[in-house]
Amino acid sequence: RIRYLLLQVRNSDDPMRQHEVQSFCRVLETTAEQIGIFDLLSSRLTAADIAGTDMFLLGGSGHYSVTDDGPWLQRALDSLRDVYNSGTPTFASCWGFQAMARAMGGRVVKDFDHAEVGTHRLKLTAAGLADPIFGPLGETFPGQMGHEDHVIELPANATLMASSGLVENQAYRFNDRPIYCTQFHPELNYADLLLRVQ
């Protein structure tokens, strides 16, 4: 049994807290009991948390921006650096995509002119087409968007996998870790994408 740990940045009354768990359960074909939940708003990951996890998952956040500042965010970014350093397989989307980029030296900005909501067309880069995770998705595919913040500079050790017509950095992977990140929520083959990452 794979031990998943979902790192969440959601308020206690956010209805998406449980919906996000159910979504990961559906695409990973597992049960909620197999997905642990860790609140990045209140705590930093420990060595025991990391050692007890086979795969990390990061999703969105309804109320918090990676472009903000404060003790909770710095603590969360420290946790993501710990995840990176552990080498544990990780899939991050939406807020997680932005946070992992910032944690590892990328740049994230709030830019309403580049906000995307709804279904948009994604196109794989040459590296994406050659990648064993992204390549099977095909050269173009639809993805669900819902963001105002976007990554304008990837970390130095990351490779761009996909872009949209409005936002260049839609997906990346780290060159030296099994960590894949997407700004979008793939509408098709989402389960296959996640299952291949693990």
Image (cartoon, helix red, strand yellow):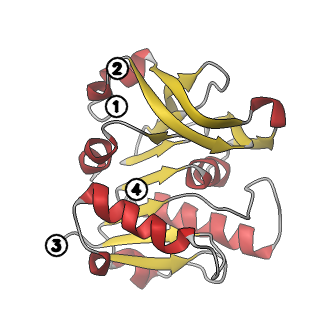
Please, is residue 111 above or below residue 2 in the view? Answer: above
- Mark found first going from the N terminus, 3 or 1: 3
Which SS class for mark 3?
loop
Mark 4–mark 2 Cα distance, whole angstroms, equals 20 Å
Label for residue 93?
Answer: none
Marks 3 and 2 in Cβ contact (< 8 Å): no
Q: How crowded is mark 2: few (under 14 residues within 10 Å), some or many (20 or more)?
A: some
**Element at label 2:** helix
- Give the Cα distance between marks 3 and 1: 25 Å
Q: What's the residue type where badge 3 is placed?
A: Arg
Mark 1 = which residue?
134
Disc 2 target residue: 129
As drawn, which residue projects farthest toward the left? 1
Disc on the earlier residue, 4 or 2: 4
Q: Are marks 3 and 1 in contact (CB under 8 Å)?
A: no
Q: Which residue is drawn at 49% across and 26% down?
A: 162
Q: Which callout, 1 or 4, points at the residue further toward the start of the chain?
A: 4
Q: Mark 4 points at which residue?
A: 90
